[in-house]
Image: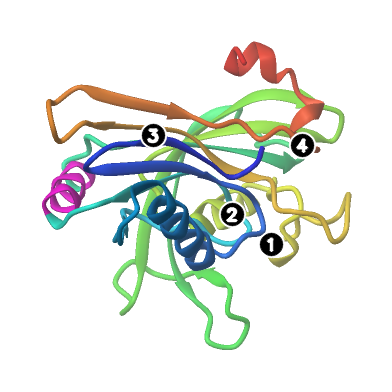
Amino acid sequence: MKASILLQNDHVVVAYKPNNIDFDLFSTQLSAKLREKKGADCKIIPSFDLDKDVSGVSLFTLDDKTQANLNTQIVDGEFEMEYYAVVVGAPIQKKGIYSACVKRDGQSGLLNHIPLLNEGAINFSFGYSVVEEVGKISLVKISGVILQQELIRFGLADMGCPVFGDKDYGGDTLAKDTFLALSLVDLRFENPENGDVLSFRAVPDTKPWTYFNLDKWFKI
């Protein structure tokens, strides 16, 4: 799926960011495209970042008031994000809640388990469920407001099913030098203008995603 604008109004811009594109570069390119359309400077504020190796729906605001509203929705749990990942293997429990307390290792640069009371600890959790299994890989849905996608990668690897292509956490055993198969597919939030719920979906359409019955699960 190519980069595209899913919604643009006076307050928000929703766009799809493909895999392997730096988020700052994506934001700059999006700003330039909006300037071409509007014929004026267009300042966009990201509500959250997507890592370079992560694809999916991205959300930007056009003013500070809207950004504050969306930040409140995130804090109050009214903001919904559903990631999907292709993983190597499958979790032992096909559905559940994963939680951990982690900190980045100063030498390796990767996340490690640490006690909750440690300084700099990140305590997080997410719900997960296996959608479909095909051979040695599985399609897994991850629910929860996770703004740092590496937490998902760590959690899935910790469950014994690293994200396909994730060389940092052991997900490159089936294929080397491939894109990381983690994407923010579904995003829902309340429209700051009128309170309506806005819902967006963007489903990756390349391998290894296409090994699964995407038409069935996403009705595309």
Q: Which residue is mark 2?
A: 153
Name which residue lies at 84% across and 61% down: 177
Q: Nearer the viewer, mark 3 or mark 4?
A: 3
Name which residue lies at 60% across and 12% down: 219
Horizontally, residue 162 falls left or right of residue 34, namely right
- List x then y, in percent, for residue 130: 62, 27
Contact between marks 1 and 3 (CB within 8 A): the answer is no
Name which residue lies at 28% across and 43% down: 12
Identified by mark 4, the residue type is Thr
**Marks 2/3: CA–CA distance:** 28 Å
Q: Is residue 211 visible?
A: yes
Secondary element at image label 1: helix
In the rendered structure, which disc, 3 or 4, sits on the residue that comes first in sequence?
A: 3
How crowded pointer 2 is (Cα within 10 Å; few <14, some 14-19, many 20+) is rated as many
- List x then y, in percent, for residue 91: 65, 37
Query: Which residues lie in the magenta part?
Result: 65-74
> Residue 173 lies in what quarter of the image?
bottom right
Q: Quadrant of the N terminus?
A: top right
Mark identifier at residue 206: 4
